[in-house]
Amino acid sequence: MVPMNYYIVLAFILFFIGLMGFILRRNLIVMLVSIEVMLNGIIILFAAISHYVKDVSGYIIIFFVIASAAAESAVGLTLAVLIYKKLKTVYSTDINNFNG
Amino acid sequence: MNWDMLIFAYLAFAIVTTSLWAILCRNPVHTVLLILVMIIHQAFLILTLGCEFLTAVQIIVYAGAIMVLFLFVVYLVNLRKETRSSMFIRKWALALIGILFFAFFFWLNINVFIKFNPQVKAYLPFNSSKSVLWWMSTYLFKYYLLQFEIVGTILLVAVLGSVFLLRKVRVSEDRG
């Protein structure tokens, strides 16, 4: 039996990796992938708590999280393709139309 | 030999290694493929947590739909320049602020989770004759029906919005 703390620390590490990727990478698509990494950390957290508390609400929330991740990635990738069509770049440092 | 620990150690090591490698990788195609490996390992981690239905959902939806969508967009967008220009933005102060916020919330939460004794309450009898999937579907359609409808609406709006955005650009390009 693995203790619950191990799963929680794993979820926090995964969330941290996703956060750093989202902040530091330049590529918009890799930033969206980092959001998926963060959501996967949240999924591990909910699954672990739901397993150890013996309540199915966490599993149902994972179901909702996966559905919203699908919607989020669809809209985000659409915006990335639109930005690429308009500006011919997908780098966040090159999108500086509103720079003062 | 403690097989539970061994399997968990392998899955955790694979998940952390592939996600770190994906973030530090230069080629976006390699990033998406490494995240695909990470998601399959994570599906089996959820299997060790006792929900086989979510393993299937994770593999079908995440690995089968979302990551293939990412891969198509990476192929659609020309990314030759990535190998020459720098990978990271030069905002290390921003990263420091992120690390500090994360450390703060980690410090707030980890005490709660470590002191939390999960054996105290058992809301649902998992070991009864009904399976986890039975309880899940019962709860989903009995108590979480409004949320279920809202998630369906969110998916519909996302699909309609992305189709609308791409269609409008194509029309304006034809006129121009």
Image (spheres, coloured by chain):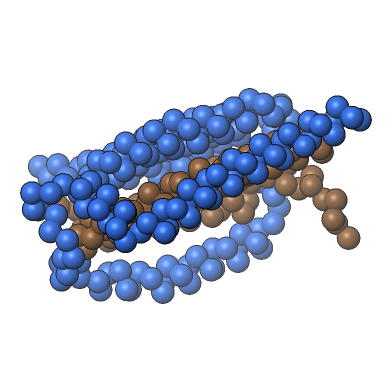
Total labels: the figure holds 0
Up the image or down, B151 lies above or below A80; here it is below
Residue B23's image quarter? top right
Q: Does B93 sit left or right of B107 as displayed?
A: right
Residue drawn at point x = 67 percent, y = 26 percent? B76
Residue B140's image quarter? bottom left
Residue drawn at point x = 31 percent, y = 61 percent? B143
Residue drawn at point x = 55 percent, y = 53 percent? A20
Q: Give how far across and how far down residue B148 sits, in percent.
A: 41, 53
Which chain can be seen in brown?
A
Q: Is residue A28 or residue B2 the one in the foreground?
A: A28
Which chain can be seen in blue?
B
Up the image or down, B94 lies above or below A70; here it is below
Residue A14 seen in the figure: no
Up the image or down, A39 lies above or below A74; here it is below
Up the image or down, B26 lies above or below B138; here it is above
Locate the C terminus of chain B by quadrant: top right
Residue B112 seen in the figure: yes
Q: Give how far across and how far down residue B17 sits, in percent.
A: 41, 41
